[in-house]
């Protein structure tokens, strides 16, 4: 039974009452109550909250407290439909009008909205910002507007969508309606851009911290990505993880490779059918020890608490994208890892993506600077968490939970080696990539070297004292330091910058990070920490598996993703509590009144059968 004080607080505070009765939670997560109070007081809010901190509740609870109609603007149809399904199962009248539904379904949804039945209406910005829709909505009792994934508004954000820009008109059309914009990924310039564009600076910005201290951060130079991935996954045998790949083709290849090597792996990308994506997503959400190999199409709106790691086989596009993607690990608060493979090819590919983008020159310059920041993060020898949090404007002490803290890489003066690289680049015409430059340094008489007579260069063979991996590391760090410019004309070549020419003249020095040949070995001793208990800790694994199987059956009957019925957190709490009756079941974290009524008896029966 809950304490009398908690019950009294719910009676006095309507948002607490909604939180418990509708969503089944006893208390707010850090920052949620502050955001809600500002909205209930009629103030505009920009809320920047870490992934997994419960952003949706920040507007869903005030929506039910205020009454009337709340508009929720979301960028993805699938995300809208999942949130609507979850709200309906919680007993909330929610609807979406979108392009994936037929006209009859959209008309029926609008009739419910117009009659006042609907409490939350989910729309894409393109659907909302038509004159017909705005005129119709302006005649209704709109009490709150929520803009999800608000970084899409900012041209400086990692996922800018031009159609989001038009949302700046909302504050004029709905002059007395509070607006909340929520995101997990907004650095200072992105936050400023959102505040200016959407709110004309009249907004209360609440930044609720970016740190996820339970996630170990590590970067490894890319050598044999399949072997490196398999070795990492085998260290986490039996754990759920997400592996991000840059392309659909690589996603399928990596998933097949893991399967061939005895790992339960599934693929997920936008080129798959909707049915195949949903089947793989449900399997990942329901089963333990499954690895999801995916493009960035997977992840938004997914709340699986026991993801033990996120592995990037390719460098993401920015630190914001990286932060958002690694934030899908360790949501249960247990030890998790974020591991990235990184190489010069990644830099070249990302530069090409930016240059090929149909965007204004200033936007491209910003994108290149963001990429430079990510490269610097990859190459840094200081605490990675300090660098990552510093990018978002937070100060931090060395974390003791990243590869650089666990095994601090030493620094050394590499000016002499750097000048050898710069000489080889200059003598070969600043037209060739790292592989060819290294062949020159090592004195390899390859066909390419001989065809161009590069064996006659004075730099030929000057680097024979070091292995290829050493020269690759040095070249990457020269690129990260701005001494070399990768891909100046889109052909993979390396050019020398002004600072590189100063280095060549001996006017500046180059200090480099001495890499461990096997970065995975650095944290091997520590990586075993917390692995024995698994995500469920002391929970009966067979009972939890039975509850997950039941959840999947119920989800399929309702044609919704499994996590919409109950989250893993709720099932774990259920398995720990082993409720005996409906009163006990109501105390399970995440069980509100509607789910108690719909699912209480069937889950109680499953728990009782397991005990018997």
Image: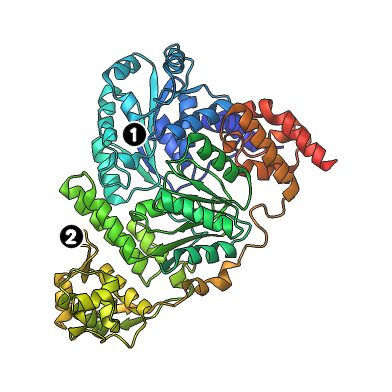
Residue in view at x 62 percent, y 26 percent = 594
Where disc 2 sits, the SS reads loop
Residue in view at x 44 percent, y 77 percent = 517
Foreground residue, 492 or 72? 492
Foreground residue, 62 or 149? 149
Measuring from the top left, give residue 142's x and y in whole percent: 38, 20
Please indicate, yes or no, whether residue 61 appears anywhere in the rendered image: no
The mark found on residue 44 in the picture is: 1
User: How far apart are the two marked residues, 2 and 1, measured between alpha carbons?
Assistant: 45 Å
- Colour option used: rainbow
Above or below, 85 against 247 in this view is above
Please indicate, yes or no, whether residue 240 appears anywhere in the rendered image: yes
Residue in view at x 42 percent, y 25 percent = 70
Per the image, the residue denoted by label 2 is 489
Sequence-wise first label, 2 or 1: 1
Above or below, 569 against 447 in this view is above
Q: Residues within 10 Å of mark 1 (few under 14, many from 20)?
A: many
Where disc 1 sits, the SS reads loop
């Amino acid at each position: 039974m809950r304490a009398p004080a908690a019950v009294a607080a719910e009676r006095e505070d309507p948002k607490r009452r909604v939180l418990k009765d509708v969503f089944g939670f006893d208390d707010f997560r850090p920052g949620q109550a502050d955001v809600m109070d500002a909205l209930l007081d009629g103030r505009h809010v920009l809320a920047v909250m870490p992934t997994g901190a419960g952003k949706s509740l920040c507007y869903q609870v005030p929506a039910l407290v205020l009454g009337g109609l709340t508009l929720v603007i979301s960028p993805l149809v699938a995300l809208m439909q999942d949130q609507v399904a979850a709200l309906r199962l919680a007993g909330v009248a929610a609807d979406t009008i979108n392009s994936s539904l037929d006209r009859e379904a959209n008309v029926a949804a609008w009739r419910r909205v117009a009659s006042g039945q609907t409490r939350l209406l989910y729309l894409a910005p393109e659907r909302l910002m038509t004159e017909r829709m705005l005129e119709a909505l302006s005649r209704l009792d709109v009490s709150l507007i929520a803009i999800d994934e608000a970084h899409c508004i900012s041209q400086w954000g990692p996922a800018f969508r031009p159609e989001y820009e038009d949302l700046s008109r909302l504050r004029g059309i709905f002059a007395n309606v509070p607006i909340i914009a929520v995101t997990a990924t907004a650095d200072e310039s992105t936050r400023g851009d959102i505040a200016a564009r959407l709110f004309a600076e009249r907004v209360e910005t609440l930044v609720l911290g970016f740190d996820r201290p339970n996630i170990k951060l590590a970067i490894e130079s890319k050598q044999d990505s399949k072997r490196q991935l398999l070795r990492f996954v085998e260290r986490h045998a039996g754990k759920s993880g997400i592996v991000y790949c840059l392309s659909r083709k690589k996603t399928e290849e990596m998933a097949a490779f893991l399967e061939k090597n005895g790992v339960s792996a599934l693929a997920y990308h936008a080129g798959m059918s909707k049915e195949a994506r949903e089947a793989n997503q449900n399997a990942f959400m329901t089963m333990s020890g499954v690895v999801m190999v995916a493009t960035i199409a997977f992840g938004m709106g997914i709340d699986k608490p026991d993801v033990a790691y996120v592995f990037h086989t390719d460098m993401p596009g920015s630190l914001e994208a990286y932060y958002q993607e690694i934030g899908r690990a360790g949501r249960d608060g247990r030890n998790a890892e974020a591991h990235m493979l990184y190489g010069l090819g990644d830099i070249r590919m990302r530069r090409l993506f930016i240059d090929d983008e149909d965007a204004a020159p200033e936007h491209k310059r910003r994108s290149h600077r963001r990429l430079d920041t990510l490269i610097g993060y990859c190459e840094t020898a200081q605490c990675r968490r300090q660098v990552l949090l510093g990018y978002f404007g937070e100060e931090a002490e060395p974390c003791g939970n990243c590869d650089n803290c666990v095994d601090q890489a030493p620094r050394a003066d590499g000016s002499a080696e750097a000048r050898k690289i710069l000489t080889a680049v200059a003598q070969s015409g600043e037209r060739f990539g790292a592989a060819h430059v290294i062949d020159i340094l090592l004195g390899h008489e390859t066909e390419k070297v001989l065809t161009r007579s590069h064996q006659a260069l004075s730099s030929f063979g000057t680097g024979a004292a070091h292995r290829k991996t050493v020269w690759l590391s040095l070249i990457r760090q020269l690129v990260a330091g701005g001494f070399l410019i990768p891909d100046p004309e889109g052909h993979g070549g390396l050019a020398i910058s002004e600072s590189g020419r100063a280095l060549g003249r001996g006017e500046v020095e180059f200090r480099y990070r001495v890499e461990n040949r096997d970065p995975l070995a650095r944290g091997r001793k520590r990586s075993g920490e917390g692995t024995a208990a698994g995500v469920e800790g002391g929970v009966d694994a067979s009972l939890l598996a039975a509850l997950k199987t039941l959840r999947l059956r119920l989800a399929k009957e309702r044609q919704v993703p499994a996590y919409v019925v109950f989250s893993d957190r709720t099932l774990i709490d259920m398995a720990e509590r082993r409720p005996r009756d409906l009163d006990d079941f109501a105390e399970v974290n995440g069980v509100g009144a509607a789910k108690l009524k719909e699912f209480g008896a069937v889950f109680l029966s499953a728990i009782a059968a397991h005990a018997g």
